[in-house]
Image (cartoon, grey):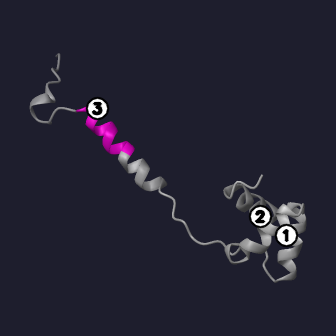
């Protein structure tokens, strides 16, 4: 009562390389970042000038709050890092 598993005739052969390439392309498409403008972009000149003058991220956040821009300190820090202002 031995069964032979010979389904290779019914199915097309499995190509691991092409399947992996298809999956990688799908992953790249899913990871594609959608760049939206930040609410900090309209204050770029002022923020960079204040940062060059020696203000901290917390002080920049308070300066933005005074102008009714509510952001977290980490948002300001990431925004500065994106502009290589470490």
Gap between marks 2 and 3 measured at Cα: 45 Å
On the image, the x and y values in percent for residue 56 come to 89, 60
Disc on res. 76? 2
On the image, the x and y values in percent for residue 19 come to 29, 39
Residue nearest the observer in this picture, 70 or 16: 70
On the image, the x and y values in percent for residue 65 come to 85, 78
Classify mark 1: helix, strand or loop: helix
Disc on res. 61? 1
Gap between marks 3 and 1 measured at Cα: 51 Å
In the rendered image, the vertical position of residue 76 relative to residue 39, given as above or below: above
Does the magenta segment cover residue 20? yes
Disc on res. 16? 3
Classify mark 2: helix, strand or loop: helix
In the rendered image, the vertical position of residue 50 relative to residue 67, given as above or below: above
Dominant SS in magenta = helix
Q: Residue at x 31, y 44 (%)?
A: 22
Gap between marks 2 and 1 measured at Cα: 7 Å
In the rendered image, the vertical position of residue 50 relative to residue 85, given as above or below: below
Q: Residue at x 17, y 20 (%)?
A: 3
**Sequence-earlier tag: 2 or 1:** 1
**Sequence-earlier tag: 2 or 3:** 3
């Amino acid at each position: 009562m031995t069964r032979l598993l010979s389904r290779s005739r019914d199915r097309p052969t499995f190509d691991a390389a092409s399947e992996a390439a298809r999956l990688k392309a799908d992953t790249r498409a899913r990871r594609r970042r959608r760049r939206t403008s930040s609410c900090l972009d309209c204050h770029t000149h002022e923020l960079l000038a204040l940062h060059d003058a020696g203000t901290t991220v917390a002080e920049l956040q308070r300066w933005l709050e005074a102008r009714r821009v509510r952001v977290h300190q980490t948002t300001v820090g990431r925004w500065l890092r994106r502009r290589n202002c470490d």
